[in-house]
Amino acid sequence: MNWEPLLLTLKLAGVTTLLLLVLSIPLALWLATTKSRLKPVIETLVSMPLVLPPTVLGFYFLVAFSPNNAFGTWLNEWLGLKLVFSFSGLVVASIIYSLPFMVHPIQAGLSGIAPSLKEAAYVMGKSKFTTLIKVLLPTIRPSLLTGIVLAFAHTVGEFGVVLMIGGNIPGKTKVASIAIYDEVESLNYAGANFYSTVLFLVTFCILLAVYLINGGYLKRFWK
Amino acid sequence: MIALTVQKKLNGPNGDMLLDLDIQIKKGQLVTLYGASGAGKTSTLRILSGLLQPEKGTIQVNGAIWFDAVTKMNRTPQTRNIGYVFQDYALFPHMTVEENLSFGLSKDGDKKEVMELLEMMELVDLKDRKPVTLSGGQKQRVALARALVQKPTILLLDEPLSALDMKIRLKLQDYILKVHKVYALTTILISHDIGEIYKLSDQVFVLEDGKVIKNGTPTEVFLNDKISGKFKFKGEVLKIEKDEVVYLVTVLIQNEVVKVIAQESEIKQLQIGDRVLVASKAFNPVIYKIE
């Protein structure tokens, strides 16, 4: 059996989730606290991937990142980034595609914290950054976990965006969901079944772990 | 010495309101802010601690300027060194009692001080517990202890006892007095309970619609009516009914419902919902102890 597409999927989901976490915390913090008039616009943009067909996103990425136009050329020449039909392109597209799944839980968690918690840390002499790291984020641990898992699982399951911008290059952009499609196309149902079973089990275990942890079942078990 | 001369527009429950304060508090005093909800008491504490920025005025504490609207001087809450006990306690839920306290230590702070405070507030047995598992009175003691870790110059207590029952309340009042005696901290307390104010404070500021309408010692403020053999209670008319030749007026006084006999001439000007004063010449009042 060829494990390469599955490993590629896990690598893509891992890298995407990590970068998303770093990106989403400041964004969610801003959304949770701002009184700016821009907020609804930014919120809409963050949520767009929820409703837009993945192919639409993929199509525009393909156009934007293409070396045939200005933005793609600029990326290529200045940053050395070739985002079409490459792994880094998949990562960028996945980050945008899974953004709401990371931002929404964190934003909801941060909005749910009583302001006095933050203020208590301030009057105790703690900076905004220390307060974020030591008070706010630990308080919303369940939300962080939910965000991480949803973003990871959503990236594992993406298909349309990957197909549009990544294509089907073995070892580079051929992730498991594409491989399944590929196997079905060539009527190799056993191969498709192999990838599908593994994906099914992996996602089931991840989600089960989240519900166990957030529901406090594990803690009760260990006691 | 605290000199607070500030103005700030607030969005109160009854629309916009101007908080307009000119308050002086001597060093080491325990003063109380008293007044109805929405009178600006919490906002006053927030302005003093730097969590809320006034539009005009100055804040001076022990000779140092903390805020000046003209020169745009504004010390951040982090640099004001204020101990603040929030109404909802604001304990950090993911930390144990001890960790909540240690969080307030500065980098070169001594862990021993945390232990001393835990002992003083009788929290040693609870030091490894998370806030979720504590009762209201215990949370309150943790919040008070935590506010003292940083050795504040001013201690602010925002209705610290309002959510607690009477017995625990009395005990916690003793803790506050103890803290005030030991540290001689300038302390500002928000309270609705006149008994509590008598017991704890040197001075009272009565706030109404963002302004101080009265200030002085508790006796001066609350006993300014000439003392006589009269009992007087303010209440609200709940019901007026006719009974034979007289009228019976049902009045709610605090949490007690009482019936008062009235003549027809007195009834004429009364309506349900009116605020009234029920007074009685008390010839020989009897005092019973309530357990």
Image (cartoon, coloured by chain):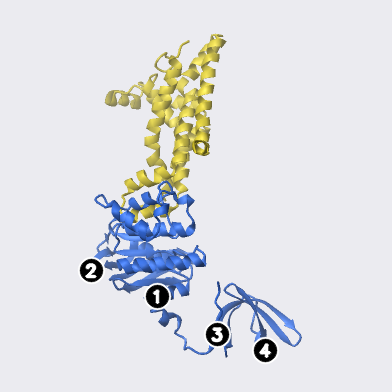
Chain colours: A yellow, B blue
Disc 4 crowd, CA 10 A, few/some/many (<14, 14-19, 20+): few
Horizontal side, residue B151 vs residue A153: left or right: left
Q: Which residue is mark 3?
A: B231
Are the residues at dot 4 and dot 1 in contact (C-beta closer than 8 Å)? no
| Marks 4, 3: nearer the viewer | 3
Q: Quadrant of residue B118?
A: bottom left
Q: Which is more N-terminal, label 2 or label 1?
A: 2
Per the rendering, the mark at residue B204 is 1
Check if mark 4 and mark 1 are on a common chain: yes
Q: Which is more N-terminal, label 1 or label 4?
A: 1
Q: Amino acid at mark 3?
A: Phe
Per the rendering, the mark at residue B87 is none
Tell me, yes or no, if residue B40 can be seen here.
Answer: no
Q: Amino acid at mark 2?
A: Gly
Q: Which is more N-terminal, label 2 or label 3?
A: 2
Q: Chain of mark 2?
A: B
Q: Amino acid at mark 1?
A: Val
